[in-house]
Amino acid sequence: MTKPVRFLIPSPVAPIEPVACTEQQIRTAHMLIAAWLTYPEERFDPALAAYDEVRDALPAGIRVHLDAFVDWAVTRPRREVCEHYVEVFDQRRRTALYLSYYVAGDTRLRGSAILGFKDFLGALGYENGTDELDDYLPVILELSATSGDPLVVQLLAAHRDGLEVMRSALHAAHSPYAHLLDGLVCTLPEVSDEVVERFQRLITQGPPTEMVGVNFAWSTS
């Protein structure tokens, strides 16, 4: 049996065109994806059940991606889902769920970047009620779903390069979670050539790092 090469760099995946959505459709999709991108425990099953109720209200271009994830999630033992989640999100640099990581990486700029997310939440009248950092993607998606503020969609769009790095890495790992990133980017505005160039560079180089004083344990994949 051929063994996988651990340090291969994922190639960019085919771009996804935006899907026309109403504000409510975006909010619904973002709430579902937020629940499924957190560790599969108390929110996971209710989100799967809720999907049956809201599925037909979502555009076909988004349903096809969420359907693919749900089909996998409901047919796998929960322990297998949890183990896969840890493998792809907790042990790989290019699938980190923290948006500022793709901008600042393991550098001294990361703290101020995270503070910027905290200030953004506060400006919209919210605060992070989880144990995660304020740049945690599910937190921002839940903010989008809860507030309905188009500024949150613009914030996500501004971090499209990081989302595309994550999406490419998940596809390279043949992870069903790639379908959730596909569904997410469908809800965002079309990206410019400059953003495409940025995320292709990030895919090749990975997030920024400072080697001094850093105990680096993640896979580079």
Image: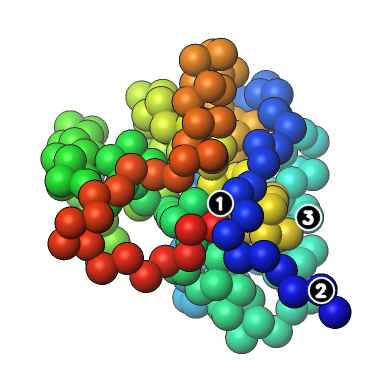
How busy is the neighbourhood of tag 1: few (under 14 within 10 Å), some, or many (20 plus)?
Answer: many
Q: Which residue is mark 3?
A: 68
Q: Position of residue 83 (x, y in %)?
A: 58, 80
Of badges 2 and 3, nearer the viewer stands: 2
- Which element is circle 2 on? loop
Q: Earlier in the sequence, mark 1 or mark 3?
A: 1
Q: Earlier in the sequence, mark 2 or mark 1?
A: 2
Residue at 67% over, 41% down = 11
Q: Position of residue 64 (x, y in %)?
A: 79, 44
Q: Could one spot residue 42 in this view of the protein?
A: yes
Q: Position of residue 78 (x, y in %)?
A: 63, 82
Q: Amino acid at mark 3?
A: Ala
User: Is residue 192 shown above or below 187?
Assistant: above
**Real-space Cα distance between discs 2 and 1?**
34 Å
Which quadrant of the figure contains the N terminus? bottom right
Q: Amino acid at mark 1?
A: Ile
Q: Which is nearer the eye, 77 or 90?
A: 90
Which quadrant of the figure contains the C terminus? bottom right
**Real-space Cα distance between discs 2 and 3?**
27 Å
Q: Which residue is mark 1?
A: 33
